[in-house]
Image (cartoon, rainbow, N blue to C red):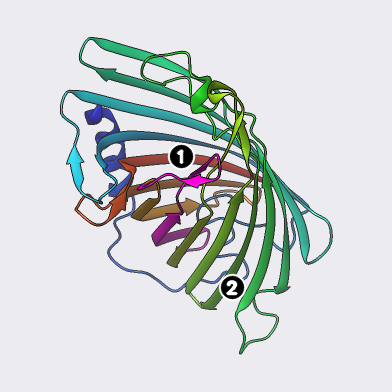
Amino acid sequence: MRRPALALAASLAAGLIVAAAPQAGAAPCCMSATAFGTGRLLIWEDLAVGLRTSVAGGLGQWDGDGDWHPYVGYDELEWRSEIWGMGALSRRASVFARLPFVATRRAAGDLDGFGGGLADVSAGLRYELLTIGEYVELPAIALTLSVTAPTGRATWGAATPLGVDVTGRGAWALGAGVSVEHTELPWFVRFDLGVTVPLPAARPDLGGVDQRFGPELATDVAGGVELTDGVVTSLVARLTWAGEIVLDGRSVADSGRLDVGLGAALSWRFDPHWTLQLAVDTGLFADGLGDNQAGRVTGTVGLRYGVF
């Protein structure tokens, strides 16, 4: 199961290799808007919709002590597709929503399973305190608020031995974040910081006792360059930390999580409305660079359509 995912990641990474970055003529507002992820609206757009599909191959696991263990006799492959959209409320404010679906295949010994379904949907609000280029000496600053609904199947609802039908967390979660971005044509750099607070959820398999996932802190630093008009490549370093799970009022020892990784992306706005996105992301498979976390290599293909 690992080889197809690694081949996909390698082919995507190869497309990101460039010899030099020529001067670009696009406005600074446009470079990073569609560079990776769902991004943000271009200043002239009223609406944007898109589809992102990812394939992730599991290579190993970090245990609760942060030690890395490659998989032996176990294979895992996850497919995730996400329909998303965002719409402008005003010049500074916009709303967004994501509708994800997940399918997973795992094999261990004589067991082999495949399952999936709707994952946890989310929606939110983005407000730009300062837009790119509004003040030459100041970076752009944007705030986000979000909510995630437990529309997926939680671990305690799994009906398969390998848990391939698990598609969600099983709890509501509230999120807040800030993005700071600076542009010097043809380059940009962006810093994102987000906090997610899962709410308590009853565990029906444990007699209805409450479980609460630990709060999460996620941060990333991205830098990119416009190679030519409409073509942007970028690199991302990311880190996610999650606190310990609380079950029936007590912390579960060694249940916190750490995930560190690197990624690269290439976007091509081949039409005023359409943008093609390619990305590859990988964990750093060494002791101390993860905790209670699967180590994966992920390749992503996305297509974005802007309405104006």
Q: Residue at x 37, y 47 (%)?
A: 253
Along the viewing direction, whichever of 79 and 159 lies nearer the viewer? 159
> Is any atom of residue 307 visible in this view?
no
| Boundaries of the magenta span | 226-254
Residue farthest along the bottom direction in this orientation? 137
Relative to 21, say whether 45 is above or below.
Answer: above
Residue 151 pos. (x, y %): 64, 29
Relative to 279, say whether 90 is above or below.
Answer: below
Amino acid at pointer 2: Pro
Residue farthest along the top direction in this orientation? 110
Along the viewing direction, whichever of 207 and 172 lies nearer the viewer? 207
Q: Along the horizontal axis of the image, is 57 left or right of 120?
A: left
Residue farthest along the left direction in this orientation? 72
Q: Residue at x 53, y 50 (%)?
A: 37
Tag 1–tag 2 contact (CB < 8 Å): no
Residue indicated by mark 2 = 28
Indicate the secondary structure of the residue bearing disc 2: loop
Indicate the secondary structure of the residue bearing disc 1: strand
Along the viewing direction, whichever of 264 and 62 lies nearer the viewer? 62
Amino acid at pointer 1: Val
